[in-house]
Image (cartoon, rainbow, N blue to C red):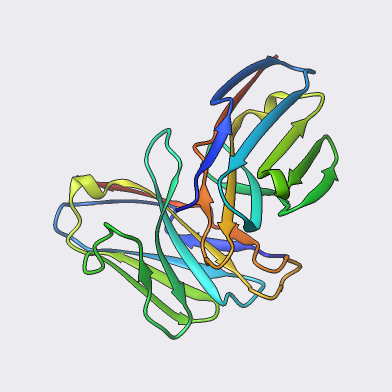
Amino acid sequence: GIQVEQSPPDLILQEGANSTLRCNFSDSVNNLQWFHQNPWGQLINLFYIPSGTKQNGRLSATTVATERYSLLYISSSQTTDSGVYFCAVERRGAQKLVFGQGTRLTINP
Amino acid sequence: GAVVSQHPSRVICKSGTSVKIECRSLDFQATTMFWYRQFPKKSLMLMATSNEGSKATYEQGVEKDKFLINHASLTLSTLTVTSAHPEDSSFYICSATARGGGGGSSYNEQFFGPGTRLTVL
């Protein structure tokens, strides 16, 4: 099956810092989504981005499908950005998302 | 748009009992719903995929007789954990997609419910 690797596994930053989270995947994909899992377990959709670049406020994402990676950028981090960020992909021909192991982000005041 | 609800949010039950978890798409018709399981500090693992009106497709290693899935309508799927044991304690999360778009979503974008925390004593 398709492999999804996220890096780094853990990231601790001070409020106001910028960060880049990476997601590598091993096959062509139909779908790539970035999620933020809050402390209560809810997965919040950040981006649907099988290719290209999108921005939403302080967050942006870029997927280079030909090179099989995606990046999530968080600028001017706030303590509320803390949590686990997951990348998930749907391989072409499949009907399901495969999740990476996540990046645990901690933003200290 | 694209809101998925789950009920209950938390359940504690005795070993040997059955527990039913409901997943509803509130503002779109979900052609496909998915059930995941998540252990503490781990990623999500897909348990099964269900399409409305047909039998669920289970992932390898998931006992279909233990985890009964019913997708009776385009807005409701249920997961029943039968004869629950302490090792079934986990966080169960459903998701839904409206393939082809719907509720303002992209073609095959998945939206997740808030999860159900099951504790089996």
Image x and y of residue A54, in percent? 83, 47
Q: In this view, does A33 lie to the left or right of B71?
A: right
| Residue at image point 53% right, 73% down | B32
Of B18 and A81, nearer the camera is A81
On the question of residue A74 being in view, the answer is: yes
| Residue at image point 43% right, 67% down | B22
Is the residue B110 above or below the residue A5 in the image?
Answer: below
Image x and y of residue B76, in percent? 49, 75
Is the residue A30 above or below the residue B27 in the image?
Answer: above
Q: In which quarter of the image is the C terminus of chain A?
A: top right
Could you say which quadrant of the image residue B25 lies in?
Answer: bottom right
Image x and y of residue B9, in percent? 44, 53
Image x and y of residue B77, in percent? 45, 72
| Residue at image point 78% right, 42% down | A62
Of B106 and B74, nearer the camera is B106
| Residue at image point 74% right, 45% down | A63
Q: Which residue lies furthest to the bottom in this view?
A: B53
On the question of residue A37 being in view, the answer is: no
Of B11 and B58, nearer the camera is B58
